[in-house]
Amino acid sequence: MFFIFGIKTKLIGKEERKVLRNGFMVNAIVSVYRNYFELFFIPIFPFSKKYSIYIPHSDEYFETGFGSTNMPAEYLQICKEVGRNY
């Protein structure tokens, strides 16, 4: 099946930050994605950002977007700070 247009998500940045989890400062991996509207597999224009955070210490994963778990407000703030760099 051939699609003329669609939506594509690209990873635009990944950083490691320290976050407070259960009273301990632990490392978290923050990823920033950008959603693009594409035409014939060519990204035309970006229309939103999506964030995800993974905490290996407690094996927790949070992300924003459709059909995802609710991200705590303090983690969302950290993700937005990282997203400003990209």
Image: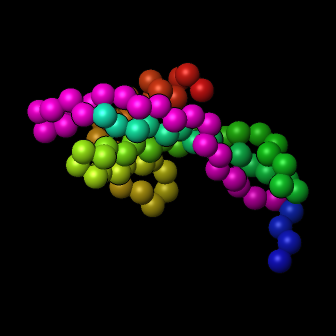
Please tell me whether residue 36 is drawn above or below residue 79 in the rendered image: below
Return the residue nearer the eye: 5 or 75. Answer: 75
Q: Residue furthest bottom?
A: 1
Specify whether 14 is left or right of 46.
Answer: left
Residue in view at x 44 percent, y 24 percent: 81
Pinpoint residue 45: horizontal percent, then vertical percent.
Answer: 77, 40
Residue in view at x 75 percent, y 58 percent: 6
Residue in view at x 70 percent, y 55 percent: 7
Residue 53 in which image quadrant: top left
**Which range of residues does the magenta coloring cover?**
5-26
Pinpoint residue 16: horizontal percent, then vertical percent.
Answer: 41, 31
Please tell me whether residue 42 is drawn above or below residue 26 in the rendered image: below
Q: Can residue 73 be spotted in the picture? A: yes
**Quadrant of the drawing holding the C terminus:** top right
> Is 9 in the magenta?
yes
Residue in view at x 36 percent, y 55 percent: 69
Query: What secondary structure is the magenta-colored segment mainly?
Result: strand
Please tell me whether residue 17 is drawn above or below residue 48 in the rendered image: above
Residue 26 in which image quadrant: top left
Return the residue nearer the eye: 58 or 65. Answer: 58
Q: Can residue 48 be spotted in the picture? A: no
**Quadrant of the drawing holding the N terminus:** bottom right
